[in-house]
Image: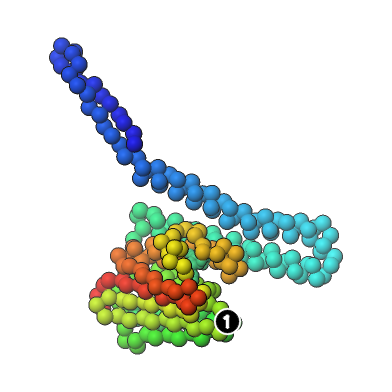
Amino acid sequence: LEIVGVPIFNERTQLRGAVLVLYDISELKKLEVMRKDFVANVSHELKTPMTSIKGFAETLLDGAMDDPEALQEFLKIIYDESNRLQFLIDDLLTLSRLENDGFKISAEKVKLAALVQEIEPLIRHKAEKKEIRLTVEVEEEAEAVFDRERIKQVMINLLDNAINYTPEGGDVKLRVQVDSELIMQVEDTGIGIEEEAIPRLFERFYRVDKARSRNTGGTGLGLAIVKHIVELHKGNIKLHSVPGEGSVFTINIPGKR
Ligand code: ADP
């Protein structure tokens, strides 16, 4: 709480009273702490792959290059870590654009079957590598009005997670439906999420299991991006999850057919 006081005098400069203004700065303080946390998190996330790239490049220059096996292995690490950096920077830029006050979604009428067809091969390829069965249910004629590229990103992020957090041999389903609103559902038979973790899940860089997220190449920003896009569409996102059994993410986007 911040207090600012001003004395009040009458015409003969006698003190008559005072005005006290009480500012509630707890919200501001909270935002400031969040901003500092974010900068610290970004720096840490950038530093980890950078350190690794630099370290392996140095080792190669110091002579490891003469061993063809080491050369191959270290170059692969350098390549993977550069990719991680690139994903991180892409996600950061996406988030920063979405958070910009002036950002507006560009809504258009979209055929959902066509949209799903664009992402399906990529997702199916990823699922097959883990022997995960992917099922897609989308009505042939379904149409809705929304920002095509952003909603596509939402589907990719949710499906990506569903595959990342589902063990080999599991199932992942995408259901898309339009009645009075657009409903997208991504269901998996994966590791699930503890109830305590759910309130923080959509925060930037929050991960239930840091090591696992890193191994899957996750940036920790996927769900924060999803949440932003859904909010920009005035929609909502619900999560039902049972640890050890799986998760269902359901998104509703209001709008006409
Ligand atoms: P990440 O890049 O780490 O996947 P996200 O923002 O996409 O970042 O997700 C945040 C965290 O939520 C993940 O690290 C993971 O712990 C958890 N999570 C997301 N989707 C699922 C899912 N389908 N099943 C289990 N856990 C999930």
What residue is at 30 percent from the left and 29 percent from the top?
4
Q: Which residue of the protein is positioned furthest toward the left in this rendering?
A: 11
- SS for tag 1? loop
What residue is at 31 percent from the left and 39 percent from the top?
24
Q: Which residue of the protein is positioned furthest toward the bottom in this rendering?
A: 140
Q: How crowded is mark 1: few (under 14 residues within 10 Å), some or many (20 or more)?
A: some
Quarter containing the N terminus: top left
What residue is at 82 percent from the left and 70 percent from the top?
68
Residue 173 placement (x, y as % from top left): 44, 82
Q: Is residue 145 above or below residue 132?
A: above
**Left or right: where does residue 11 sit relative to residue 215?**
left
**Left or right: where does residue 234 sit relative to residue 96?**
left
* Residue 155 visible at all: no
Residue 147 placement (x, y as % from top left): 35, 69
What is the quadrant of residue 85 in the picture? Answer: bottom right
Q: Residue at label 1?
A: 168
Work out whether residue 55 or residue 208 is closer to the camera in this orientation and state it. Answer: 208
Tell me the amino acid under the disc marked 1.
Answer: Glu
What residue is at 69 percent from the left and 59 percent from the top?
53
Work out whether residue 82 or residue 157 is closer to the camera in this orientation and state it. Answer: 157
